Amino acid sequence: MIIILKPQATEQDANEILDKIASLGLKPLYMPGVERTVLGALGDERKLNQLHLNSYPMVDEIKPVLSPYKLVSRDMQQHDSVVSIAGVQVGGGKFTVIAGPCSVESEAQLFGVANMIKQQGVPLLRGGAFKPRTSPYSFQGLGLAGLQLLRAAKAQFNLPVVSEIIDPNDAQLMYDYVDCYQIGARNMQNFRLLEAVGKQDKAVLLKRGMSATIEELLLAAEYIVAAGNPNVILCERGIRTFETATRNTLDLNAVAYLKQKSHLPVFVDPSHGTGVKSLINPLSRAAVAVGADGIIVETHLNPKEALSDGHQALTADDFAQLMADLKPFINAAGKRL
Ligand code: PEP
Ligand code: MN
């Protein structure tokens, strides 16, 4: 339920109502805005009837939040959320590029890519240390050694890092090495994992499951926010369809829809979304046009030798072209890099 206060309501008026909400065992939410303050009550909304909030002089309107996801819904918060990844702003008029290899493979590989993207003005480095692979015989990532390389690359190039977490028990360990936890498509509904990152105060890049509906993605985000971490970035990374020409079908409907229904930043992963190198550039431009707040892209200086996803990795030249081609689209969208 959301409770919209009159413009002249004071903080004291708000607190009085918040205390009453809490006394019913509901979770009170305080959302001061520029013009008005909005309050929320999460839990069994029927209990709220006991308060007769309509008769409070400072209450203007009471509206149910109809969507099953509440905290991440635009009904609850009209303005866009801005998420910080170690001081790098995501959302709120920025278009942010995250780039790097699929997997961390070695110091030379990671530092080479980090240096290349840094020269392109990219503010955030990606790289998997724990890789959830379809086959148990594929490269599974360097684990802790990979995290150590990520931390070293961050220090050397001043690039905060994004890396995938696949085990809830790794949340503490990874906290010291990464600036943003990535939840991969295969784990979008791993609820213990969502709760584990929900208890941290670092950003979470939540990828859509390959067969997940948009509502399921938003409910997965709701798990993280309900556990206490509001710093969630949604990521469309392609879904499974009948189409086989591309690895996945990048669902750009979802991006526009998510921007309307949720206040969270929305990213696009055109690398996994297409799985086709030559399509990453056009689909990145489409992502900007449809309202995405950023992209996460796989890059490798020598894709032929990559231990994972080499077929979709952009080389330094491809990446430079992508950045150049994106700029006019970002300007046209009224955003800045
Ligand atoms: C990745 O980012 O390398 C990855 C495994 O992505 P996804 O979970 O979207 O497949
Ligand atoms: Mn990958």
Image (cartoon, rainbow, N blue to C red):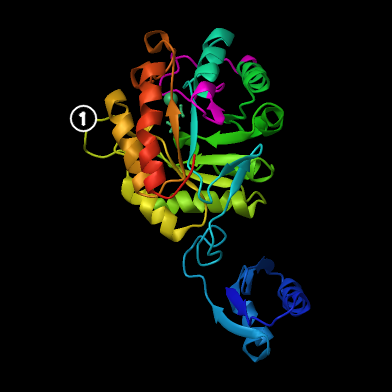
Q: Quadrant of residue 170?
A: top right
Q: Residue at x 60, y 17 (%)?
A: 146
The image quarter containing residue 317 is top left
Instruction: Give the residues in magenta.
Output: 118-145
Q: Is residue 213 visible?
A: no
Q: Secondary structure at mark 1?
A: loop
Q: Nearer the viewer, residue 120 or 207?
A: 120
| Predominant SS along the magenta part | loop
Residue 173 place in picture, x, y as percent: 70, 28
Q: Position of residue 248 (x, y in %)?
A: 30, 34
Q: Is residue 52 above or below residue 42?
A: below
Residue 223 rendering spot, x and y as whole percentages: 57, 51
**Which quadrant holds the N terminus?**
bottom right
Label 1 packing within 10 angstroms: few (<14), some (14-19), many (20+)? few
Tell me if residue 122 comes above or below residue 239 in the rendering: above
Q: Please say whether residue 157 is one of the residues in the magenta stretch.
A: no
Of the pair 30 and 92, the residue shown nearer to us: 92
**Residue matched to label 1:** 245
The residue drawn where x is 34% and y is 47% is 289
